[in-house]
Amino acid sequence: MPGSFQRDQLTIRNHGQEKRLFNSRVVTAWLLIMVLILVLIGRLLYLQVYQYDRFVTLSDQNRVQLVPIAPTRGLIYDSKGDLLADNRPNFTLTVTKEKADDIDQLIDDIGHIITLDQTDVDRFKRRMKLRRRPYESVPLKLSLSEEEIAAISVNQYRLPGVQVEADLVRHYPYSSDIVHAMGYVGRINERELQQVNAENYSATHYIGKLGVERYYEDALHGQVGMQKVETNARGRILRVLEKEMPKPGLDLTLYLDLDLQHMAEKALAGRRGAVVALDPKTGGILALVSVPGYDPNEFVTGISFNRYKALQDDPDLPLFNRSLTGRYPPASTVKPMMGIAANESGTINLGYKVFDPGWYQINGKGRKYRDWKRWGHGLLDLDQAIAQSCDVFFYDVGHKMGIDVMSDWFHRFGYGQVGSLDLPEASKAILPSRDWKQRMYKQAWFPGDSVNMSIGQGYFLATPMQLATSTAIIANRGKWVMPRMLKHFGDPEHVITADMDPMVAEYERRAAEQRAQLPPDIDLKNPQLWDYITNAMVNVVNGRTGTARKIGKDAAYKIAGKTGTAQVVGIKQDERYDASKLDERHRDHSLFIGFAPADDPKLVVSVIVENSAGAAAGVARQVMDAYLLGKDPDDNPIGDIPHDAD
C-alpha cells in the first residue's frame, strides 16, 4: 500500500508541465506589458505630435489674455483756447467674474467694507450679463474716495477678483455756465452699448449724452487699444506679450466765446430765459445760454436718485435747455419776415398802408383782434408797422396772404425745422400749415388762425435758436448759414483737416448732407427789400417811435432789431393786461431779435426772458456791448422796456 501511494504522487505531480505553464504565463504577461507600453507610447505620440496644435491653443487660452486699453477722450476748447472739457483721474472698483467664486457673496462682503448703492449693484449685474471678453472686469462703483480705496486695499486678500482701477473721467471746469451749450458724458447704458461698436467700447465706461459731447462722440472717443498678456492660474498678469496702443480722440475747438457766454448769463441776471448769439458770416455759435443750468459733473460718474429727482422737480426747470428745446410763440419778432413774404408774394407793395383804430375785424364783422396799443397807431406803412410793431397792419396782411403763403415763407427762414448742424437736442418746434392742423386736430384752417399767426401767436411756436437763425438770414441778405458749435477739429493752434484724418472727412460728409436738406438761399425779386426791412428794424431801436428806442440811446453803433411779447395765458377780449394781477409765471414773455452793427453785421442775437415783459431788449443790448465794445453788463445797466411798448 505504501508503495502504491508513492507511485500515485509521482504520477500526479509533473514538474515539466508546471514549468511550461509558468513560462507561458510569463511570456503572456510580458507581451501584455509590452502591448500596454506600446499603447501608452502611441497615446503620448498622438497627444504630443498629432494633437500638438490643439492643446497649445487650449493652453494659450488659459495662459494668454487680450486686455483692452481705453483711449483718452479728446479735449474741447473755446475759440480763444480756454479749456471747456478735460479729463481727470478717477478710481473705480471693478470685479472680474472668472476670478470670483460667488459673485453675490462677494458683493455682500464688499458692502460690509464700503457703502454700495443698490443702483450700483443692479447696474453691475446687468453689465455682467452682457457679452464680454473672458477676464474682462466690470465696474461696480465709480469715483472711489481715498478712504474707500484704503479700505478695499486692506481687505483685498479676501476679495478674489476685486481690484481698484485708475482711469480718466470727464471734468467740466465751468460746470453750469456751459452745460446747455456743451452737453456732458455719462455712464454708458445697455441701450447705448447695443448702438455702438462693442469692441471699441470694451474698455470704456462713458459716452456722450447731450450736446457737442454726443454729436461728436465718434471723434472724441478715439480707438481702443489691445495688449496680449500672460497670466498665471489666478489670472494675475505675469508679462505683456504684445501691445497695440489706443488712438486718442480728436480735440475740438468751438466757436463758443467763453467770455461772451459769461456776459450773456450775467445780463439775464438770474431770470429764466435764453440767449443765442451767432456770427452771421460763419454761423458760428458764440454764446448759447439757458438759465438756470446745472452741474454736468454730477452726471459723469452717476448722479444719485434723490439729487436727480430734485433737479426734475425744480419749478425753474434747470434740466430744460430753453435755447434749443424751448418752444415759445415768436410773437412780433416774425414781423420783418412777414414784411418780406408779403411783398415778394405780391400780397402788398411797399406803398401799402393800413389804418389802425386799435382793433381788426375779418370782413368788418365778428371778433375784434386787438392791437397792443389800445387806441391804435393810425395810418401806417410797412416801415412804421415794423418800427411801432403795429398788430393791425399784420392782421390785415396775414388775412390777405393766407396760411399757405405764410407757412411756405416761414419755412424758408428756418422755422419748423432743425437748421443747426451739431446740436442733437434742437427742436423743430411748430410751423403750422393747413395740413398740419388737419392732421393734429382734424379741423380745417380758419381765417382767424391766419390772423393770429401773422403776429407770431396761435399755433406758431419757435425756439430761440430758430429766431437767431432767421435773423441771421436777414443780416446776410438771404444767405443761409447753418448755426454750428464746431470751429475745427484739433486744438486752437493745430487744425486737423479731412485729408489728415478720415473721421474729419466723415463729419464733413454728414454736414453736407444736413445742409442739403435745408432751404436754399433766399433770392428776392426785389433785392432792395433787404435794405428796406433792415432800415425798419433800425427804426425799432433808433427811431423816434421805435418800440426798443430805449436801448438805442447813446449806442456807439446802429442796431437792427425787433421786439416781441408772447402771451402765456389768454385774457378776455375787452380786458387789459395787468401783470400785477397775474401769478409771476403767468406773465408775458419778452423776446428780442437783432444784429449789429446794422450796416456790417458781426453779431446776431436772439433773447427770451420768461415772465418778464420788456426785459429781452435790454439783455440783447448788454450782450452786443460786451461783444463789440467789451463792456461788462454789471457796469452797463439798461433796464426793461415798459410792457405796452410792444
Image (cartoon, grey):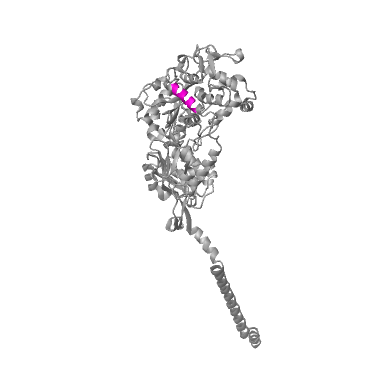
Q: Position of residue 17 (x, y in %)?
A: 63, 84
- Segment tinted magenta in the rendering: 530-540
Q: Position of residue 64 (x, y in %)?
A: 48, 58
Residue 321 visible? The answer is: no
**Residue 553's quadrant in the figure?**
top left
Q: Is residue 89 magenta?
A: no
List the single residue furthest toward the bottom.
3
* Image-based side of 602 in relation to 133, left or right: left
Depth check, front residue: 114 or 203: 203
Q: Position of residue 503 (x, y in %)?
A: 49, 47
Q: Point out the image quarter for the N terminus.
A: bottom right
Q: Is residue 537 magenta?
A: yes
Prevalent SS, magenta region:
helix
**Residue 285's quadrant in the figure?**
top left
The residue that appears at 56% across and 37% down in the rendered structure is 517
| Residue 208 sits above or below residue 400 on the image | below
The residue that appears at 50% across and 11% down in the rendered structure is 375
Q: Position of residue 453 (x, y in %)?
A: 56, 22
Residue 226 visible? The answer is: yes
